[in-house]
Image: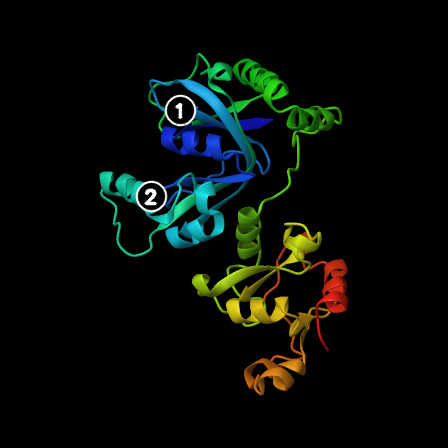
Amino acid sequence: MKFWVGVTDNTWFEYLAKLQPDEVNFWQPGGSTPFKAIDQFAPFLFKLHSPQNFIVGGGFFVRHSFLPISLAWESFQQKNGAPDYVTFRTAIMRYRESKGRDGSGDPVIGCIILTSPFFFPKDKWIPIPKNWSRSIVQGKTYRTDESEGASLWKEVQARLEEVNRDLESELVARERYGSEQLIRPRLGQGAFRVLVTEAYHRRCAITGEKTLPVLDASHIKPYAEGGPHSVSNGLLLRKDLHTLFDRGYMTITEDYRIEVSKRIKEDYGNGREYYQMHGKPLVVLPSNILELPSREYIRWHNKNVYVS
């Protein structure tokens, strides 16, 4: 198994260690280089800046995405490692300006999305491996089939056993089956939003609209009703269509066609734009068959939410 040790902003780590969120955005201020070092759900460990040369926690890699600062904040809020948007933006601008990058408007940043993060108390911090070079700026890949990587991963597992027995039991259970992908952690709301956005190629499923600030990741079966944060339970919709979908004025069929309720006109005396969509197929769907809208969740929405 490959895993990553990433050089981590100390303030970011300290804030999130207190927050203890279910997911985090390990952001990169440059927004130009994709992160491809490890596979999905592989471990991503946090190494503090020198002179604190320790590995202090980590998480599990979900996806890398390029997002405008405003959308990164809207998706993850305090899970970006800052208490408010102004603090978050200021930290990014400080990095960008130090590299001579433009800080105007709503610049794009790199977002490494991690789920099930863990944060070791200071007495459990792990010294960096002997082969860690002082010249490393962003991070380094290790492998469990090599001595340094195997030793480090053993240390991480030992700390997890002490501070997070539930997570450690998942790791051990999956290892028994010989899988290099140790766990498939539950996704959070922010990861759900990004994964749905990317699966639908950043376009509204119904209209094809591609202006990101007006697009929402909608659950077909709401999370509050037991619907998971999975792409197959999601649709990327323009904000007004998301509202109509959630309130039952619009739905989709199991063959991915649009249905619009007559109640829009009855309740509001209008809706001509929406009725023009009735019966038409979705214009955008995920390329991956496993990410297509689940017929199970569509049936649930039609039975429990849609008003015909």
Secondary structure at badge 2 equals helix
Is residue 255 placed above or below 109 in the rendered structure? Answer: below
Disc nearest the viewer among 1 and 2:
2
> x, y percentage for residue 234?
63, 58
What's the residue type where badge 1 is placed?
Leu
Q: How many numbered marks are there?
A: 2
In this picture, residue 148 sits left or right of residue 257: left
Residue pointed to by mark 1: 48
In the image, what residue occupies the spot 33% across and 43% down? 87
In this picture, residue 27 sits left or right of residue 256: left
Say the numbered circle drawn on residue 182: none
Callout 1–callout 2 Cβ contact below 8 Å: no
Is residue 221 placed above or below 250 in the rendered structure? Answer: above
Seen from the viewer's position, the closer of residues 218 and 148 is 218
What's the residue type where badge 2 is placed?
Thr
Q: Quadrant of residue 30?
A: top left
User: Of marks 1 and 2, which one's residue comes earlier in the chain?
Assistant: 1
Seen from the viewer's position, the closer of residues 204 and 22 is 22
Instruction: Tell me if I can see residue 44 in this picture.
Output: no
> x, y percentage for residue 296?
77, 59
Instruction: Tell me if I can see residue 28 in this picture.
Output: yes
Where the N terminus falls, by quadrant?
top right
Secondary structure at badge 1 equals strand
Is residue 123 placed above or below 184 in the rendered structure? Answer: above
In the image, what residue occupies the spot 51% across and 67% down? 239
Residue pointed to by mark 2: 87
